[in-house]
Image (cartoon, rainbow, N blue to C red):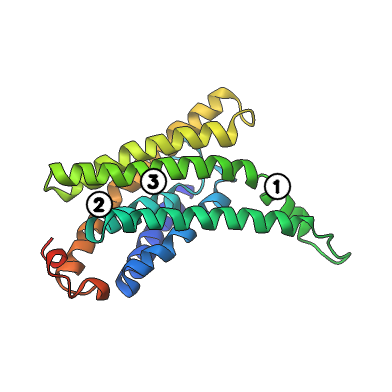
Amino acid sequence: MNEILWITMLVVNFAAIMVAFRAWGKTGLYIWMPISVIVANIQVTKTIVLFGMEATLGNIVYATSFLATDILSEFYSKESAGKAVKIGFFSLITMTVLMQFALMFKPAPSDAMQQSLQTLFSLMPRITLGSLIAYLISNTHDIYAYQFWKKRSKALWIRNNFSTFVSQAIDSLLFTAIAFWGTFEINVLIQIFISTLVLKWIVAVFDTPFMYLSRKWVREGKISDLADVEPLASK
C-alpha cells in the first residue's frame, strides 16, 4: 500500500510543478520552492517502511526542488536558480519561527489541537536546522554543478542527473546527521540515509522526462515569460 501511495504522490508532485511552470513560468517555480521545503519538513517527521526499507516521508516533494532549480538554470540563469533557493530558505525559517510562537500561546479549555501541534512542531527547530544547512549547501552545489555540466555536455539528461545525484547525496548526509543524530540508533540512521538517498535518486531519474517536456514547451513558446527570448527558444 505504501508503495502505491508513494508512486501516486510522485506523479502528483511532478504534475503540480509542471502546472506551475506552464501557468506562471519562472514565478511558478518560485512559488514551488516554499511549498517543497515546508511540506517536506513536515512530512519528514513521519517514518515509514517503503520497498522493504525504513525511510522518512518528504523525499519526493523535497527532491522536486532540484527539478525547479535545474529548470531555472537551464532556461533562465544561475542567478534565477539562486534566487529560488533563497526564497525557499526564507520561507522555511519564517514557518519555523511562526510555529514556535503559535506553540507559546496558552490554548483555550476547548482546544483539541495543542498537543498535536506540540508533537509535530516541537521537533521542528532541530529538523529545520538540519534542513537549512543541507538545503543551502546541496542546492547551491546543484546550481554550480549544473552550470559545470552544461558547459561540458550538450546532453540535457547528463547535466540534470549528474548535478542532482551528487547534490542529493550531500543533502541526505548532512540532514540525517544533524536532524536525527541521537534520536535513532546508528543502524537506523544508516538505513534512513541509504533509503532516503535511493528514493531521492529514483525521483531524480524520473524527473528527467519533465526536463525534456520543459524544453519542448520553451521551444514551442508555451511559457509566457520565455516566448520572446530567441536564444532560449532554440535550446
Contact between marks 3 and 1 (CB within 8 A): the answer is no
* Residue assigned mark 3: 139
**Alpha carbons under labels 1 and 2: distance apart:** 36 Å
**Relative to residue 142, is residue 58 drawn left or right?**
right
Q: Which residue is mark 2?
A: 208
Q: Is residue 160 left or right of residue 60?
A: left
Instruction: Kindly indicate whether the residue at mark 2 contacts the one at mark 1 (C-beta within 8 angstroms).
Output: no
Q: Which residue is mark 1?
A: 122
Q: Residues within 10 Å of mark 2 (few under 14, many from 20)?
A: some
Amino acid at pointer 3: Asn
Q: Secondary structure at mark 1?
A: loop
Residue drawn at the location 65% of the way across and 54% of the way down? 97
Q: Residue at x 37, y 68 (%)?
A: 28
Up the image or down, 73 lies above or below 159; here it is below
Nearest to the observer: residue 53 or residue 72? 72
Residue most toward the top?
A: 186
Q: Nearer the viewer, mark 1 or mark 2?
A: 1
Q: Amino acid at mark 2?
A: Thr
Q: Image height check: is 27 above or below 9?
A: below
**In this rendering, would 73 be left or right of 27?**
left
As helix, strand or loop, the secondary structure at mark 2 comes to: helix
User: What is the x, y in percent for residue 188?
Assistant: 55, 28
Q: Secondary structure at mark 3?
A: helix
Quadrant containing the C terminus in the rendered view? bottom left
For image coordinates 39% across by 57% down, the residue present is 83
Q: Earlier in the sequence, mark 3 or mark 1?
A: 1
Residue 125 picture location, percent across and down: 64, 45
Q: Earlier in the sequence, mark 2 or mark 3?
A: 3
Label 2, label 3: how many angstroms apart (C-alpha)? 17 Å
The amino acid type, in three-letter code, at marker 1 is Ser
